[in-house]
Image (cartoon, grey):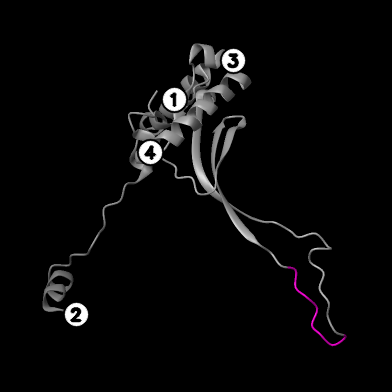
């Protein structure tokens, strides 16, 4: 024990106390206020069907294997040779996919070797709008939906914003 601690604890009889937020020191009204506020926000969102109006999109890589046919994978082997292993030829696809509260609205695979730039993404958005027009014509006509996407530079290009 250091000299300072000995003086504080022994001579001055001081102890260390951490200040904590204690819920029971709040009044009943103070405890109910955050709950009421959250319920009001949820009620407003439900009344306006706000969450049903959001369409969000993201991109990801899909990894897949192209299986060979039984005939393609057959090999000539001797009696003592090890059993041949099933070859898997991996490939990956880049996919842009868009969801609403009901599930997937639109998906689009990026062609192999294609770069996702503003021009390509504008085409994806045009396809998405056509799909929204097909699956939810009322929302499309009234433009009563919100497209939520990340902040990647491609999505913020002036060419893409509609």
Q: Magenta stretch: dominant SS?
A: loop
x 83%, y 80%: residue? 77
- Whether the residues at callouts 4 and 3 have beta carbons within 8 Å, the answer is no
Query: Which of the pair 71/53 is nearer the observer?
Result: 71
Disc sitting over residue 125 in the figure: none
Q: CA distance from mark 3 to mark 1?
A: 28 Å
Helix, strand or loop at mark 2? loop
Q: Nearer the viewer, mark 4 or mark 1?
A: 4
The residue singled out by tag 1 in the image is 41
Q: CA distance from mark 4 to mark 1?
A: 33 Å
Q: Is residue 51 visible?
A: no
User: Where does the image place residue 22, in percent across and percent down from the top left?
Assistant: 34, 46
Q: Image quadrant for the C terminus? A: top left
Q: Which residues are magenta?
A: 79-86
Q: Residues within 10 Å of mark 1 (few under 14, many from 20)?
A: few
Q: Nearer the viewer, mark 4 or mark 2?
A: 4
Judged left or right of residue 80, residue 22 is left
The residue singled out by tag 3 in the image is 137
x 48%, y 15%: residue? 143
Q: Image quadrant for the N terminus? A: bottom left
Query: Which of the pair 62/8 is nearer the observer?
Result: 62
x 60%, y 57%: residue? 91
Q: Is residue 20 above or below residue 78?
A: above
Query: Which of the pair 98/81 is nearer the observer?
Result: 81
User: Where does the image place residue 125, in percent across and percent down from the top left?
Assistant: 48, 29
Name the N-terminal-most of marks 1 and 2: 2
Judged left or right of residue 19, residue 102 is right
The residue singled out by tag 2 in the image is 1
Name the N-terminal-most of marks 4 and 3: 3
Disc sitting over residue 154 in the figure: 4
Q: CA distance from mark 4 to mark 2?
A: 61 Å
């Amino acid at each position: 024990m250091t000299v300072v601690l000995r003086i504080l604890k022994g001579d001055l009889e001081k102890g260390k106390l951490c200040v904590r937020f204690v819920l029971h020191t709040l009044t009943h009204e103070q405890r109910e206020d955050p709950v009421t506020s959250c319920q009001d926000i949820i009620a407003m969102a439900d009344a306006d069907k706000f969450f049903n109006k959001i369409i969000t999109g993201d991109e990801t890589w899909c990894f897949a294997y192209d299986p060979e046919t039984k005939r393609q994978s057959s090999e000539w082997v001797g009696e003592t040779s090890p059993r041949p292993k099933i070859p898997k030829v991996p490939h990956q696809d880049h996919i842009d996919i868009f969801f609403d509260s009901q599930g997937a609205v639109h998906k689009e695979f990026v062609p192999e070797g294609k770069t996702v730039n503003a021009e390509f993404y504008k085409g994806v958005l045009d396809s998405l709008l056509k799909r929204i027009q097909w699956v939810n014509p009322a929302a499309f006509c009234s433009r009563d939906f919100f497209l939520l996407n990340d902040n990647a530079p491609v999505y913020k290009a002036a060419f893409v914003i509609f």
